[in-house]
Image (cartoon, rainbow, N blue to C red):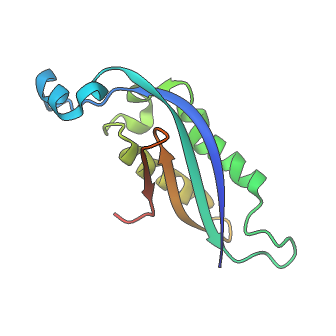
Amino acid sequence: MIYITRREHFSSSHKLENPKLSKKQNEEMFGKCSNFHGHNYYIEVTLKGNPDKDSSYVMDLKLLKKIIFEEIIEKVDHKYLNDVDLFRKVIPTTENMAIIFWDLLAKRLKQYNVKLHSVKLYETEKNFVEYKGEK
């Protein structure tokens, strides 16, 4: 089994706010993040599989790049995440974003002879989440 990873970048803004809570409760729960702010995110998508006998690729990374752009980057880059359809029913935390991105990619990758291993989403240089499909 071989693991391959593609890393991409996007910039988005959001605010963390639970509509069921008061402004004060949101400020207490989310701190500064309850205000409008933005991040320069990095996403790492890791696939696992066996190299193809003809190409020796697990998957052509140009194709993986295309899929990441179509399923994720085009939908979130330079957007206010709270207004993006993908996040209308959830708070756009990095955790929720990683789960949604996993679901989008897993659905799209089913047609290829690979398995999605993980989605890592870096919100800052020091803060990231990793999701491996376990719910």
The residue located at (15%, 32%) in the rendering is 20
Q: Is residue 24 left or right of residue 125?
A: left
The quadrant in which residue 130 appears is bottom left
Q: Is residue 73 above or below residue 2?
A: above
Question: Eyeballing the image, is 10 above or below 97?
Answer: above
Q: Nearer the viewer, residue 95 or 108?
A: 95
* x, y percent for residue 84: 44, 30
Residue drawn at x 54%, y 58% as measured from the top left: 107
Nearer the observer, 76 or 15: 15
Q: Is residue 31 above or below residue 125?
A: above
Q: Residue at x 54, y 29 (%)?
A: 11
The quadrant of the picture occupied by the C terminus is bottom left
| Quarter of the view holding residue 75 | top right
Q: Is residue 23 left or right of residue 60?
A: left
Residue 32 percent coordinates (x, y): 28, 25
Indicate the position of residue 4 as horizontal and vertical percent values.
67, 64
Check the picture and name the quadrant holding the N terminus: bottom right
- Residue 68 left/right relative to 24: right
Q: Percent position (x, y) of residue 43? A: 56, 46
User: In the rendered view, does 117 fall on the left or right side of 69?
Assistant: left
Q: How many marks?
A: 0
Residue at (43%, 29%) from the top-left corner? 81
Outermost residue on the front side: it is: 126
